[in-house]
Each structure stands twice: as C-alpha cells, then as structure tokens.
Amino acid sequence: MKRGLSRALPAHCQGGAAAVLALVKHHGDMRTSRLAELMAVDMSVCSRHVAHTVEYGWIERLPDPDDKRSRILRLTPEGYAMLGELDRRVTDAFSRHLTEWSDDDVALLTALLGRLRDSFGDCRAHHA
C-alpha cells in the first residue's frame, strides 16, 4: 500500500518532502527542530527533507525574530500549490483503489485506522 501511494506522488515530491509540507501547513511556521520532533526523525534526516523543499521553492527559511541564529520554515505559494497537487493525487489513488468498497466498509476502515493510531499513541515520546 505504501509503495502504491508513493507511486501516486510526483517523482520530485516523495514522502519526506510531502510530510514536511503537510506538517508546516497543519502546525504553521516553525523551526526545523520542531519539525524533526513532529516527524519523529533525527535532525539530519529532517534537514535533508527541508533542503529538498527549499530547493524546489516550496518552503522558505526566514530569520527567527526571537533568535537571529535560527530559521523559521514557512510554506510558499508554490508549497501550497504542491500540497494541492499531492492532495489531488492521493485522493485519486484512494478513489481508484476503493471503488468497489461500500460506504460502510470505507467508514469502518477509517474508524479502525483511527483506533490503531490511538493505540500507538504519541510515538514521538519514545523517539530518541
């Protein structure tokens, strides 16, 4: 399933970059350290994903007004456009693969995935 969804994404915006964009949109402007925490990955991994999004113009790094040595990550208009493209592609992929599922089956899947996510809890608390 993960491979199938990744095939739906543009070749230049795979999972890590997509996660960066989605998290910055959802949580707002933030430092890379906060993003790494939300992604539950090491700073070096997060920095590579951020560098990729900056290279494509989807994220900009701005001076942190509270600490001039730090940078704040912010979505650009191009980043919002890429998120729209990602949303369209993932929605199309799910639509294609769930076409034979009943509405009740999709609702059950959604509920069970939510329950599974809740059972795992906040995995970030265990990341070291």
Image (cartoon, rainbow, N blue to C red):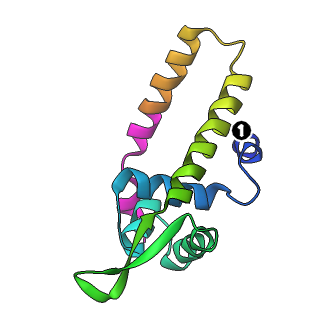
Left or right: residue 117 versus residue 106 is left
Q: Residue at horizontal 39%, vertical 60%?
A: 124
Residue topped by disc 1 = 1
Of residues 80 and 3, the one nearer the viewer is 80
**Residue sitting at x 58%, y 55%:** 18
Direction from residue 9 to residue 75 in the image, left or right: left
Farthest-out residue, front = 77
SS for callout 1: loop
> Residue 45 magenta-drawn?
no
Instruction: Give the vertical position of 94 relative to 81 (above or below).
Output: above
Q: Where does residue 88 sit, x and y in percent of width and height?
A: 63, 36
Q: Relative to residue 62, is residue 94 depicted above or below?
A: above
Q: Residue 104 lies in what quarter of the image? A: top right
Q: Nearer the viewer, residue 52 or 37?
A: 52
**Residue kind at label 1, given as amino acid type:** Met
Taking the spot 67% from the left edge, 58% from the top edge, the residue there is 13
39 shown above or below 92? below
Residue drawn at x 56%, y 58% as measured from the top left: 78
User: What is the x, y in percent for residue 31?
Assistant: 37, 73
Boundaries of the magenta span? 116-128
